Amino acid sequence: MSGPQCCSNPPSLNPSSGAGHVEQLGGLSTYVSGAPDSKNAVIFITDVYGYEAPLLRKLADKVAAAGFFVVAPDFFKGDPYVANDPNRPIKEWLQEHGPEKSFDDGKAVVEALKSKGISAIGAVGICWGAKVVVALAKVELIQAAVLLHPSLVTVDDIKEVKAHVSVLGAEIDHMSPPELLKQFEEALAAKPEVDGFVKIFPKVSHGWTVRYNVEDEEAVKCADEAHGDLLAWFTKYLK
């Protein structure tokens, strides 16, 4: 994740974006959208830019509109990565915000959701967030997972998941190239107890699902297709 691709097309953060609101959940400031009385929840674990990205919140709202209680916690605790900051390159930022450090925060969010009476929980891992989601999936804290252009996830990680996993990747991606995703697919195929799905979207780059140009018709179309796949996965395994 040291390359520039993971940090391309940085969003303009907007703390007031989205149809939902921010509240405390599991000890973290969390963007919340959807019906709180839903028994099905989806956790968004974001890329390095965090939970104030408008297109991320737009996707969260889209999932919420389908009947899910959606939460996007601020795993970076007010300190998202700032693109092109010469004083703090991504490698340095990652030393303070490694995904392995966020597993406990993720677990606390899951427990907070369960305390609200939610019975089925899924998680979306976007780029950086995919590593955290996989960690939750290994210990059966969630029932279903969707990884959007994952970073840092290994074949060994995939071999250990116990939740149903959908991996939506990009053809042009140095973080998780198609060859690696094919290995994910093989690892999932060897696990009959979980359903695995891997799809490589042609002609798109890492980050295309939440960092696309809203004025580019083709970019919007590709993002929408991935969003539809994500929603179908959670509808299948959480409802």
Image (cartoon, rainbow, N blue to C red):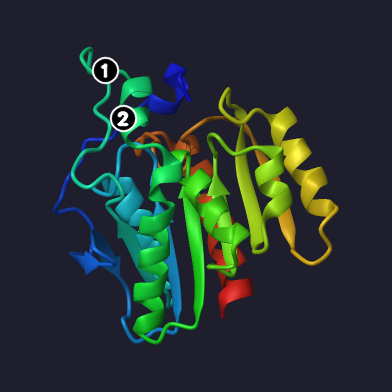
Amino acid, disc 1: Asn
Instruction: Look at 61% across and 45% down and name the residue there.
Output: 168
- Is the residue under label 1 in contact with that under label 2 (CB below 8 Å)? yes
Report which residue position mark 1 lands on: 84
Q: Secondary structure at mark 2?
A: loop
In which image quadrant can residue 11 be found? top left
The numbered mark at residue 10 is 2
Q: Is residue 186 above or below residue 38?
A: above
**Residue plotted at (22% across, 47% down):** 77
Residue 119 percent coordinates (x, y)? 49, 83
Q: Is residue 171 above or below residue 150?
A: above
Residue 20 makes an appearance in the image: no
Asked if residue 20 lies left or right of residue 101, the reply is left
Distance from Cα at disc 2 to Cα at disc 1: 9 Å
Q: Residues within 10 Å of mark 2 (few under 14, many from 20)?
A: some
**Label 1 Cα neighbours within 10 Å, binned few <14 / some 14-19 / many ≥20:** few
Kind of residue at disc 2: Pro
Q: Residue 96 is drawn in which quadrant?
A: top left
The number of discs equals 2
